[in-house]
Structure formats: structure tokens, C-alpha cells
Amino acid sequence: MKSRLRPGSGRMSLLVTAGSTREKIDPVRFISNYSTGVFGYEIAREAKKRGHRVTLISGPACPEPPPGVKVVEVESALDMGRAVKKHIKKCDCLIMAAAVSDWRAASPSKRKIKRGRKNKKLELVENPDILRGLGKMEKKILVGFALETERLADNAAEKLKKKNLDLVVANKIGGKTSPFGRNPTEILMLDRFGNKSILRNRTKRELAGVILDKVSELKLDNKFSV
Ligand code: C5P
């Protein structure tokens, strides 16, 4: 595929995460969420089209990988955290679009858990926050996502600060259409300078372009240049 960028004219190495994670309960069951991976895959696809180098860390059951994109498949949040730490060293920007499971089973069973007891209790432990665990990465652009039912702007601002991010993309849930999958969606973008934009009823493909434009803009006045 032909690159739209000339070497040295803004080409970046992007690390994108997508999809859900699966947290094992026993060999046949897991905890997960409704994320389909479409948003992260569209970002990876558009980034590749623009001539960036792209590595996609993908949770299970995601769409067909975009052509030319290196895909690292992971299952759990802990796997995803390890993969991010390994690949981020060579990247200029991390776009953390994955819906990482907040909890995992404290002690997953090696054998299938049988029915029979009326009140089976499942103990959960919190997964580490991958983005937060990276700390302040002076020379990297860090982009987080947020899926919220309310207080979109307040939650986005809170995440930006707490997770040391350069940009937050907050996606609304609870409207007429589900934000999961290929439905058009509404986002609020908030950058580290306090610039805010709201985009309504856009496809994830369109939004992928808008997010990548913003990342390039942040990179220009950033911390580093290529
Ligand atoms: O789950 P939460 O709303 O905090 O997610 C916000 C951002 O943090 C997302 O970009 C998500 O990928 C990231 N995240 C993470 N590690 C987690 C949970 C979320 O990096 N354990």
C-alpha cells in the first residue's frame, strides 16, 4: 500500500490496543465485556493507510486484521499489560482503545467447576491499570479511552489527569444505539491543554481519522519531533 507520508514528514510508530480481555474462571468460562475491537481496528487500519508503522495488540474475537498491521494476540489483562510494556519501547504513541477487564478471578480453577452448590461465590481481584502503570512517559503520546454513561466531560478530565494522558476519547453509552460494534457513535475528545471537541453520530472509521489528526497535532507541539 502506498504511504501518504514522506519519510521524516510525520511518520510515527503507533501501538494500538483493541478489544476486550478475557479473565479465566475455569477452562471453559471467563469474565469479559461487550467490546468488539472495531474502534481499535479502525484506528490501526487508518494509521497504516496514512503511512505510520502500526502494532496492534488485540484481545480475542476481534475483526479481520487490517492489511500490513502487525498483530499481537493476547487474552487476559495481565497478558495485555506485558505486551504493552514490551512493545511501547519502540513506539512514539500508545492508543489504548482496549476495554481491559477491571477484575479477574482470584484463583481460576484448573478443572471445570461443577453445578451443585446453590451459592457459588467467585472472588475477584483488581487488574493492574496498564496506562497508569506506565507512569509519565516523557517522549510518548498516551491516548486513553473511556466508556461512560454520564458526566462524559468530568470523567474524561479525571482520567486524563489520573493516568497522565495526552488525550482522552470518551465514548457515550446509554443512548439510542449501542456504542459497541459498527454503530455510529458520539465522542468527546479532551487533550492535555484542555481543548475539547464533541463529535456526534460519526462512524468509527471517520472518528479514527479525527483521532489520528489530533495525535499528529499533539506530536508536533510535543515533547519531541521526528
Ligand atoms: O476502564 P477505564 O475507564 O479506567 O479505562 C480508561 C482507559 O484506561 C482506557 O484507555 C483503557 O484501555 C485503559 N485501561 C488500562 N488498564 C486497565 C483498565 C483500563 O490501561 N486495567
Image (cartoon, rainbow, N blue to C red):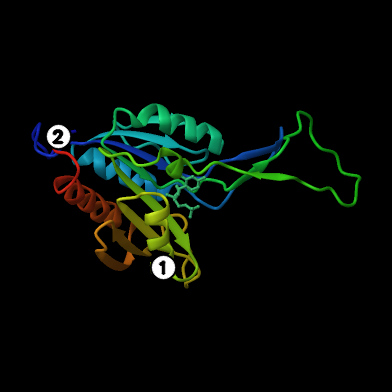
Q: Which numbered marker is on residue 171?
A: none
Residue 70 visible to an observer of this rendering? no
Quadrant occupied by the C terminus = top left
Whether the residue under disc 1 has CB within 8 Å of ligand 1: no
Instruction: Identify which amino acid the numbered label 1 is placed on.
Output: Asp
Earlier residue among tags 2 and 1: 2
Question: Is disc 2 in contact with disc 1, using a CB cutoff of under 8 Å?
Answer: no
Horizontal side of 56 relative to 174 (left or right) equals left
| Residue occupying the point 35% across, 42% down | 136
Between 114 and 166, which is closer to the camera in this rendering?
166
The percent coordinates of residue 202 (x first, y second) are 31, 63
Residue of label 2: 2
Residue 168 visible to an observer of this rendering? yes
The percent coordinates of residue 44 (x first, y second) are 31, 41
The percent coordinates of residue 145 (x first, y second) are 40, 53
Instruction: Identify which amino acid the numbered label 2 is placed on.
Output: Lys
* In the rendered image, the vertical position of residue 3 relative to residue 154, given as above or below: above
Q: Which of marks 2 and 1 is in front?
A: 1
* In the rendered image, the vertical position of residue 102 relative to residue 88, given as above or below: below
Specify few, some or many for label 1: CA neighbours under 10 Å numbering under 14, 14-19, or 20 or more: few
Horizontal side of 133 relative to 95 (left or right) equals right
Q: In which quarter of the image is residue 89?
A: top left
The secondary element bearing badge 1 is classed as helix
Quadrant occupied by the N terminus = top left
| Cα–Cα span, label 2 and label 1 | 41 Å
| Residue occupying the point 41% across, 41% down | 17
Residue of label 1: 154
The percent coordinates of residue 13 (x first, y second) are 25, 34
The secondary element bearing badge 2 is classed as loop
